[in-house]
Image (tube, rainbow, N blue to C red):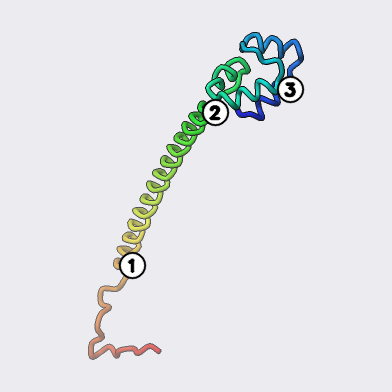
Amino acid sequence: MNRQELENILQKMSPENFDAFVEKFGGDAKSANTIIRNYIDHPEWEPRLCQILGFSTEEERRTQSILLSAVSARWSAIAAAISAIISLLALLFALGFGKVCEQGAQQSAPADWGKPTASQPASHGG
C-alpha cells in the first residue's frame, strides 16, 4: 500500500467506519491526516495497516511481481526452446528434401552424358 491508496481509502470511509478502523488499529489518531502522517513516519506500521484495510504491502507486491516475472521468463524460455526445435526440424527436412531431389536428378540423367567424343561435337553455349 502506498500513501495515496491509504489517503483515498481513509477519505472514503464513513465516520463510523473510520472510528471502527481507529479502534482496531489502536493509537490516538483522531483524523485521517494523523494516520497518514504516522504511516509516513513509521513505515513499520504498514503491515498492520494493510492487514486491517485488506491491502497488500509494498513488499508483498514486489514479491508478487518477481514471481510473475519468473513465470514469464519460464514461458519465454519454453517458447524459445520450441522455436529452436521447430527450426532444427525445418533444417533437417530441408536437408533431407535436398538429398532426395539430388538423387532424383542423378537417376534421371542419361548415363552417356559426359565428355563429348570425337563423334559428338561439343556444343558451345553463349
First in sequence, mark 1 or 3: give its number: 3
Residue at left 45%, top 41%?
A: 76
Disc 1/disc 3 C-alpha distance (Å): 83 Å
First in sequence, mark 2 or 1: give its number: 2
Residue to which mark 2 is pinned: 58
Disc 2/disc 1 C-alpha distance (Å): 69 Å
* Within-10-Å neighbours for mark 2: few <14, some 14–19, many 20+: some
Label 1 SS: helix
Q: Indicate the quadrant where residue 16 lies.
A: top right
Is disc 2 in contact with disc 1, using a CB cutoff of under 8 Å? no
Q: Tell which of 67 and 63 is nearer to you.
A: 63
**Image location (x, y in percent) of residue 49:** 59, 18
Type of the residue with mark 3: Gln
Residue to which mark 1 is pinned: 105
Q: Tell which of 106 and 35 is nearer to you.
A: 35
Q: Tell which of 56 and 105 is nearer to you.
A: 56
**Image location (x, y in percent) of residue 77:** 41, 41
Label 3 SS: helix
Residue to which mark 3 is pinned: 11
